[in-house]
Image (cartoon, grey):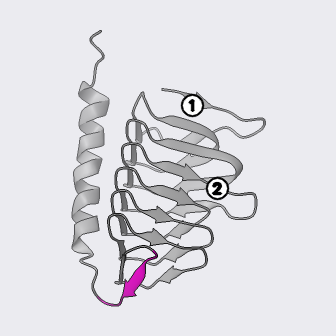
Amino acid sequence: MPIYALGEFVPDIHPDAYVHPDAVVIGNVTIGADSSIWPGAVLRGDEGFIRIGARTSIQDNCVVHTTAQDGTTVGDDCVVGHLVHLEGCTIENGCLIGNASMVLHRATVRSGAIVAANAVVLDDTEVPTGALAVGTPAVIKAGRARSHMAREGAKVYVERGRSYRANLRRID
């Protein structure tokens, strides 16, 4: 798997985390225990920091980036779906970020909130605890998140990461 130091910044990956061989991790990136980073995902901590909590999945072809002013933090027990772009934002614990969505600069997705597939959470937006963000730009629907979806998805991906770590082998 391509894991790169960038100058003085060396990724800090917990030994119980799973990083797929086709994911890329660069620079000032921390990945917590039992988290998983899937094929094609790029975590590029070049200008600022990226922090991925424990038991969080960053799924296929995600881009997690940062700015010099705004780091990117994803909490514990989160599911970040396929093709998601996170940039200089904060995702608190127990969130689900739906496929092909974007969460941009200084936005905060509070604990237990969900960003629906294809939604765009613009700069400086707050998605409150338990809310659902839908559309482009995202419209906030208070109390509409089904937070159990993130918890269940996080558990599935912890097990999937363990299985891949134990059983994945290249055959070409």
In terms of image quadrants, where is residue 171? top left
- Can the viewer see residue 82? yes
Q: Pointer 2 and pointer 1: residues touching (CB < 8 Å)?
A: no
Name the residue located 66 percent from the left edge and 54 percent from the top edge: 49
**Front-lying residue, 111 or 117:** 117
Is residue 138 covered in magenta? yes
Left or right of 109 on screen, residue 162: left
Q: Residue furthest front?
A: 136
Residue position marked by numbered label 1 in the rendering: 3
> What is the x, y in percent for residue 29?
60, 47
Q: SS at mark 2? A: loop
Q: Which residues are magenta?
A: 137-143
Name the residue located 54 percent from the left edge and 80 percent from the top edge: 125
What is the distance, in whole Å, between disc 2 and disc 1 at their CAs? 17 Å
In terms of image quadrants, where is residue 111? bottom left
**Which amino acid is tagged 2?**
Thr
Is residue 157 covered in magenta? no
Q: SS at mark 1? A: strand
Tell me: residue 149, above or below residue 24. below
